[in-house]
Image (spheres, coloured by chain):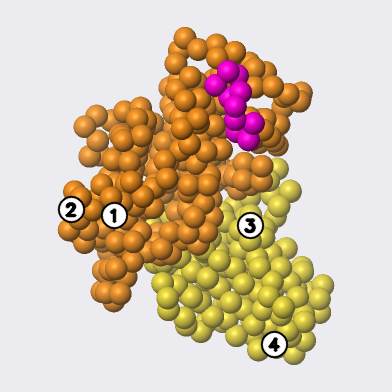
Chain colours: A orange, B yellow
Amino acid sequence: MISKELLDRLIREIPSPPENAVRVLEVLRDSESTPSKVEEALRYDPGLTANILRMANSAYFGLPQRIGSIRQAVVVLGWKRVYDLVMVSCMSSVMDRPVEGYDLAKGELWRHSVAVSVTAELLAKELEIRGVDEVFTASLLHDIGKLLLGILIKEHMRDPEFFSKGDSSFDRLEKGLIGIDHAEAGAIVLERWGLPHRVVNAVRYHHNPEDSPKPDSMLDILHLADVTCLILGFTAGKEGLKYEPSSSVAKRLNMSSSILERASSLTLEKMNQLMRV
Amino acid sequence: MRIVVDVADMKASGNGDEIVTHALGSCLGLTVWDPISKVGAMLHAMLPLSKINPDKALENPYMFVDTGVPALFQAFYKLGGKKERAVIKAAGCGAPLGDDRIFKIGERNLIVLKKLLWKNNLLLAAEDTGGTQSRTLYFDLSTGKVVVQSGGERREL
């Protein structure tokens, strides 16, 4: 079982987003901000600025006009989108690394995270669910706990019985062996980083949405998007498809196999557009 | 040479190459081989029926089983493969835990495949489908050998 000290140490080992990006995210979250405040916060970070503009002009958004400044990006894409882009830009290097234990090669955790983010937005659109603006961020960060637990899982990999427990879901196996699953571990990291409560909650319960103290459609969508991407192989680690989709969430959101397949048919292209920039 | 088949993709060859596809979850991995001409092709299809997104099927027929399988055979015939000698093997079509039908994309993929083969008087020589594993598929065109790897285990199909 994991001790509090070990957990603390593992959290400190995860590189947090760069300080400047955190400041930009705060400005973007502040309802009283103005586009010039965002520009001000980005003034000394040409790398981040260039990344945002590159993504804003990518095929993902397919805008008819070219975006040449942060101010224009805020006006054309909106606050939320620029927030998402800052998030993508500063998390890609943290989450791009290989994750031992889960058998994720370099880039695979990031690819899965982006896949879930675009699938979540596609599902929200197909299911006509509004008020889930932060689902992109929550999706991008939902598996960050794997970075934390990878090393501990690796220890247990040597146990041949670990994966033969056929009908148990992977998060239950993690909990049984380490005392915590990657969803809970991720939520603890994001709490420390000061992410909004709703995002932290969605990450914490993304494999067991019924356990959430109160139902939340954003959590529900993250859950369904994650399961969808695991099923489709974007990207399953060693645990394969060993997760259980929640039937009550599917019912609550009026999910159907045709909505699932329709969103899935669009995932690949959107994912590649966002990964290519 | 090693040729990689991506998700929603197909590759055909006749040069003794090895064709590989990774991370088959609910997706269908299908191989076809001609032991005389040593021509073969592999498909990695995501979803059962193209009617869910006909525009996408026009752009990329390999995304769907109902459009991808005919396209796979066309490529196989074009390289000199013969229907009467075709050795066909299937892998993947996995499913998550639980009983909810909505999420059984893999089962739907397999049903559409079997219907298509049956209608065309074709049979599967071997299959490794279903379950909760993610699979990698290796296809050696010089021998026709198909190997499935999942969870550190390798087995010949």
> At 33% across and 41% down in the image, what residue appears?
A189
Q: Is there a contact, CB below 8 Å, between mark 3 and mark 4?
A: no
> Residue A15, located in which quarter of the rendered image?
top left
**Secondary structure state at the residue bearing disc 1:** helix
Q: Position of residue A65 (x, y in %)?
A: 76, 23
The answer for how far apart the CA atoms under marks 4 and 2 are is 54 Å
Q: Are marks 2 and 1 on the same chain?
A: yes
Say whether residue A110 is left or right of residue B32.
left
> At 43% across and 79% down in the image, what residue appears?
B153
The answer for how far apart the CA atoms under marks 4 and 1 are is 42 Å
> At 43% across and 59% down in the image, what residue appears?
A99
Disc sitting over residue A3 in the figure: 2
> Residue A35, located in which quarter of the rendered image?
top right
Q: Which residue is mark 4?
A: B142
Q: As shown in the figure, which amino acid type bears the numbered disc 1?
A: Asp
Dot in front, 3 or 1? 1
**Secondary structure state at the residue bearing disc 4:** loop
The residue closer to the viewer here, B155 or A152, is A152
**Secondary structure state at the residue bearing disc 2:** loop
The answer for how far apart the CA atoms under marks 2 and 1 are is 18 Å
The answer for how far apart the CA atoms under marks 2 and 3 are is 44 Å
Tell me which segment is drawn in magenta: A39-48
Vertical position of residue B30 compared to residue A138: above or below? below
Q: Position of residue A258 (x, y in %)?
A: 51, 43
> Residue B114, located in which quarter of the rendered image?
bottom right
Chain for mark 2? A
Q: Is residue B4 visible?
A: yes
Q: Which residue is mark 3?
A: B8
The residue closer to the viewer here, A138 or A119, is A138
Q: Mark 2 packing: few (<14 Cα in 10 Å), some, or many (20+)? A: few
Quarter of the figure with the C terminus of chain A: top right
